[in-house]
Amino acid sequence: MKLRLGGTAAHISAEPIPKYIAEVVGRITPAAVEAIRNNEGKDTHTIVEEAVMCNVRLSKDRIMYRSDAIAQRMAAQPGNGFKVMLAKHSISTGLVDFFDE
């Protein structure tokens, strides 16, 4: 499966792919689709950046709501010393940017 971001739509072609790749693509596809819908007519770089940030937010939500350990820690220390933050790692620079919501 290939996901190509374009100006107005995502193109998905059905080719056999390993299961672990399908799982990753399945997790990022909602972010890509949302970015394409919300940024119609914008350049590819803008759409990709929005897809990345949307995926960061969705990943944080998955972590917070599907991890019992994190949910328990958040409940035990609300606003005190434990926080799940948004972050984006740049493969090209190695830097991690943290974002407040």
Image: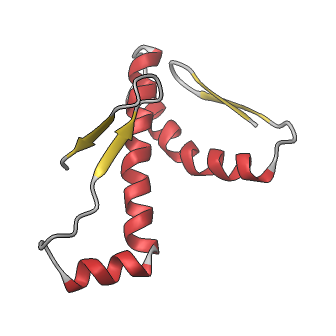
Q: Position of residue 98 (x, y in %)?
A: 25, 43
* Total numbered badges shown on the rendered structure: 0
Rendered residue at 44%/55% (across/down):
59
Please identify the quarter of the rendering in which residue 46 is found. top left
Please identify the quarter of the rendering in which residue 3 is found. top right
Q: Is residue 34 above or below residue 46?
A: below
Q: Is residue 85 left or right of residue 48?
A: left
Q: Is residue 101 above or below residue 38?
A: below
Q: Residue furthest front?
A: 94
Q: Is residue 95 left or right of residue 3?
A: left
Colour scheme in use? secondary structure
Q: Position of residue 64 (x, y in %)?
A: 37, 68
Q: Position of residue 99 (x, y in %)?
A: 23, 43
Q: Residue furthest right?
A: 16
Rendered residue at 36%/75% (across/down):
70
Q: Which quadrant of the rendered structure holds the N terminus?
A: top right
Q: Is residue 21 left or right of residue 68?
A: right
Q: Is residue 11 left or right of residue 36?
A: right
Rendered residue at 40%/24% (across/down):
93
Question: In terms of depth relative to the viewer, which is nearer, 32 or 69?
Answer: 69
Q: Is residue 18 above or below residue 78?
A: above
Q: Position of residue 82 (x, y in %)?
A: 21, 69
Please identify the quarter of the rendering in which residue 11 is found. top right
